[in-house]
Amino acid sequence: PKLSYTNFGVGHPFSTLDASDFAYQGFGVSQEVPYPGKLALAGEEARKEAQGELQVYRALVLERTSDLKTAYYEWFRITKALEITAKNRDLLERLERIARARYSVGKGIQQDVLKAQVEQSGLAQQVEVLEQRKATVEARIQALLNSERPLGRPADVKLSPLTANLEELLASVDHQAPRLNAQRAMVDSRAVGIERAKREYLPDFAFNFEWQKTGGRFPDYYMATAEVKIPVFFARKQRLGVEEAAARLSEAKQNYLSTRQGLVFSVKDQYFTARTSERLLALYQSGIIPQASLSLESAMAGYETGSVDFLTLMNNFGSLLTYEMQYYDELSKHEQAMARLEALTATPRSRP
């Protein structure tokens, strides 16, 4: 409602001094009333749009949580790589001592000693690179946590198996993914917007009531008016509003389809990544790493007795180092894929 006050003419309406017969003061109230249904449609459109914004907020929470988890698993991977490198540096020092001892008694060659020293320098270079990466990922974790507190060291990470199949994950996208729900709510809001735009073809109303206090010989009186707002220029105004609302609905539908396609691709990508990592981790645990360890032990024993050359020994050492690194790379990759799937489908994973 609107309140109004009018002071017309000279004099003082509440006093007979210097009064004018035509002077008055008016006090009024007026109210515009849209055609029935317009306000309800506007409220429905705003409500659905607000639901979409709520889903956007949920999506951001899940995505930032996923970012934090992926950064944590990368931190864990680098920490494990540093531990493996330190362990292998100790082993390489042992190999160097063996090569030096064989060389001192004339059973080995100086090149073996130099090769061991070169490999030690290479591991030292890897440590420097890993330390830099560790500092970077720790800074990212602190930024995501909005904290400058020291992080300590990551806890051990165990494999969390992927129990859902691809069809179940895709169904979760259609029913639970916040990004998709946000686009769906926007489509619904735009659909209501079309109905609201069509209602603009219908007239609006206005009502006014005013009490006028006169200061002369005329009595006080009241005045009530009613107005009808007729959309006579509908061809140039309301029609274009309906066309704009239809275009906004088409845009929302295309955004929905594009968002769904992107989510489906991302879910499939992370699903296949997790499945492949699980198979590779099983191979590393059951065969590759144990076999590489036995091969290195056998090569070390053979080198000490002179039945295996130093190059073969170093090849076995390098293979074991590579496989151990690759195991934790795959473990980190698997857990990162699981964290991204959790954000994409809004489905918490169950841990064993």
Image (cartoon, rainbow, N blue to C red):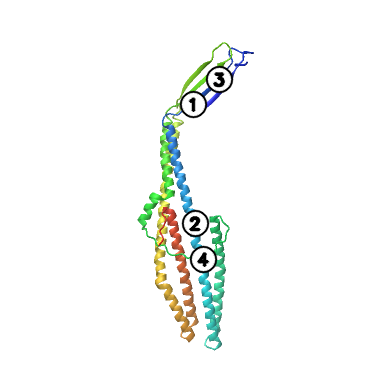
Q: Which numbered disc, 3 or 4, marks the residue that appears first in the sequence?
A: 3
* Discs 3, 4 touching: Cβ within 8 Å: no
Dot 4: what SS? helix
Give the CA distance from mark 4 to mark 1. 69 Å
- Label 3, label 2: how many angstroms apart (C-alpha)? 65 Å
Q: Quadrant of residue 279?
A: bottom left
Identify the residue at image location x=47%, y=77%: 316
Q: Position of residue 201 (x, y in %)?
A: 42, 29
Q: Which three-letter amino acid code belongs to the residue tagged 3?
A: Gly
Label placed on residue 26:
3
Residue at image mark 2: 67
Q: Earlier in the sequence, mark 2 or mark 4?
A: 2
Whether residues under marks 3 and 1 lie with C-beta atoms below 8 angstroms apart, the answer is no
Residue 23's x, y, as percent? 59, 15
Element type at mark 1: strand
Distance from Cα at disc 2 to Cα at disc 1: 53 Å
Q: CA distance from mark 3 to mark 1?
A: 17 Å
Mark in the foreground, 2 or 1: 1
Q: Which residue is mark 1?
A: 31
N-terminal of the pair, mark 4 or mark 1, is 1
Q: Mark 4, residues whose alpha carbon is within 10 Å: few (<14), some, or many (≥20)? A: many
What's under tag 4, amino acid-wise? Ile
CA distance separating discs 2 and 4: 17 Å
In the image, 155 versus 58, the foreground residue is 155
Taking the image as shown, residue 250 lies to the left or right of residue 30, namely left
Residue that carries the numbered disc 4 in the rendered image: 78
Residue 68 drawn at (x, y percent): 50, 57
Label 1 CA crowd tier, 10 Å (few <14, some 14–19, many 20+): some
